[in-house]
């Protein structure tokens, strides 16, 4: 099958909290890969690191210290690029007992280097649909102008009339109502669903190799959510663009994803084919994944449990990350044989079936 289109290995993105004088470990050792034409679904609770992983891949983390270590390899049409290469020259890490305790960062030099590396990649190589489309669009520029600008910047189409024709074509493809009228509208004149369609049209108009969709249905009513999911399904079938799909809605992920990465506490705890990861009765499965699936409103869950079950406990503190298994304090499947190991040592992401990996001591050697 060849090397993955996007390959992230041991990515760590920390932010410094002046109030607590400590680091927020938003992403703490994420490893995942996306093949050409594949849709990877990324699920997990708020604060699990999903969006920060996506923003790190786009080079959009600018706050200090931001991305501090790991590798991100992108193998697009222009060849292989290592998106974090050279950034270590602008950062000095001070570690204690294997943990980063202090970061010294040349933020100006860092940001200039990121822009040099990412300029040929953003838009053409990797495009992104942001979580809030209305705030992602420029409120002072018409929707049509923003799409034509992306086309002229990232494609061989430079003539304004040709770019406009291509923008209108994409607005029609994403089923925008009255595309010629909406072309001249400002974002504040569009509904949330229309803004989302405009964002999708802008992202796809440059024909990227990889599309990152961060919560594409958040904030939309149920009817519009269904239409956006249907649109993404059609675009996936027609254009075969590799996609990183981030969502809280497991039903959206199950409809669109080929593989699924379940994130918890800033890292990936389960990774594998979507039919296996999202099948409630499939084993082996990480206890957190099982708890998420049991909390989905469905007739089957009501029959099995009587009431919807919640994931007990609280999300781990991203500042004081447990040294052992990050889900240990909330896990209801811990046995006496592994209790001490769970509390003291973090498990590796271990392959438990072909293409299926789980980070849990229940599945040891």
Image (cartoon, rainbow, N blue to C red):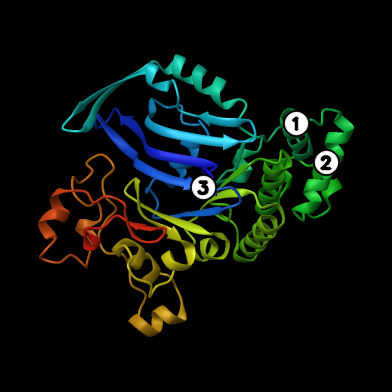
Q: Residue furthest right?
A: 161
Q: Which residue is mark 2?
A: 166
Front in this rendered view, residue 210 or 199? 210
Above or below — where is 118 with respect to 227?
Answer: above
Q: Is residue 272 left or right of residue 258?
A: left
Furthest residue in direction front, as rendered: 1
Could you tell me if the residues under marks 2 and 1 are in contact, i.e. CB atoms within 8 Å?
Answer: no
Of residues 10 and 195, the one nearer the viewer is: 10
| Left or right side of 49 for 221 | right
Instruction: Using the rendered view, name the quadrant where residue 102 is placed.
Output: top left
Could you say whether the residue bearing mark 1 is in a helix, strand or loop? helix
Residue found 37% across the figure and 49% down from its top: 48
- Which residue in the structure is indicated by mark 1? 149
Mark 2 lies on a secondary structure that is: helix
Residue, x 26% and y 45% (percent of image)?
A: 317
Above or below 66: residue 174 = below
On residue 34, which mark appears? Answer: 3
The picture places residue 233, in percent across and down from the top left corner, at 65, 60
Dot 3 or dot 1: first in sequence order is: 3
Q: Is residue 109 above or below residue 136?
A: above
- Tell me the CA gap for discs 2 and 1: 11 Å
Decide which of tag 3 and tag 2 comes sooner along the chain. 3
Please state the horizontal and vertical placement of residue 362, each as a whole percent of the image. 22, 63
Q: First in sequence: mark 2 or mark 1?
A: 1
* Label 3, label 1: how far apart the Cα atoms are: 28 Å
Please tell me whether mark 2 or mark 1 is closer to you in this view.
Answer: 2
Disc 1 packing (10 Å; few <14; some 14–19; many ≥20): some
Q: Residue at x 58, y 56 (%)?
A: 217
Residue 51, position as x, y percentages in the image: 46, 44
- For the image, the number of numbered tags is 3
Mark 2, Cα crowd under 10 Å, few <14 / some 14-19 / many 20+, is: some
């Amino acid at each position: 099958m060849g090397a993955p289109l996007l390959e992230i290995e041991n990515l760590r993105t920390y932010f410094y909290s002046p109030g607590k004088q400590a680091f927020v470990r938003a992403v703490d050792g994420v490893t995942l890969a996306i093949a050409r034409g594949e849709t990877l679904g990324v699920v997990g609770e708020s604060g699990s690191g999903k969006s920060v992983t996506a923003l790190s891949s786009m080079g959009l983390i600018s706050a200090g210290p931001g991305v501090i270590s790991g590798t991100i390899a992108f193998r697009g049409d222009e060849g292989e690029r290592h998106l974090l290469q050279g950034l270590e020259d602008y950062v000095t890490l001070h570690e204690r007992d294997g943990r980063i305790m202090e970061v010294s960062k040349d933020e100006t030099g860092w940001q200039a280097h990121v822009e040099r590396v990412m300029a040929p990649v953003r838009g053409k190589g990797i495009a992104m649909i942001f979580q809030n489309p209305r705030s992602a669009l420029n409120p002072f520029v018409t929707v049509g102008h923003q799409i034509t600008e992306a086309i002229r910047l990232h494609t061989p189409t430079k003539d304004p009339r040709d770019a406009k024709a291509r923008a209108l074509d994409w607005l029609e493809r994403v089923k925008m109502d009255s595309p010629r009228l909406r072309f001249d509208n400002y974002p504040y004149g569009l509904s949330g669903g229309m803004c989302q369609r405009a964002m999708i049209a802008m992202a796809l108009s440059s024909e990227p190799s990889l599309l990152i969709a961060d919560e594409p249905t958040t904030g939309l009513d149920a009817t519009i959510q269904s239409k956006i999911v249907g649109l993404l399904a059609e675009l996936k079938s027609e254009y075969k663009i590799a996609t990183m799909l981030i969502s809280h809605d497991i039903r959206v992920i199950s409809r669109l994803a080929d593989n699924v990465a379940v994130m918890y506490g800033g890292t990936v705890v389960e990774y594998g084919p979507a039919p296996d990861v999202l099948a409630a009765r499939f084993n082996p499965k990480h206890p957190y994944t099982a708890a998420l699936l049991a909390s989905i409103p469905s007739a089957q869950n009501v029959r099995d449990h009587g009431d919807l079950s919640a994931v007990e406990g609280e999300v781990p503190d991203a500042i004081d990350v447990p040294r052992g298994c990050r889900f240990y304090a909330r896990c209801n499947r811990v046995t006496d044989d592994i209790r001490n190991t769970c509390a003291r040592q973090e498990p590796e992401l271990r392959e438990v079936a072909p293409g299926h990996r789980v980070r849990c001591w229940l599945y040891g050697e």
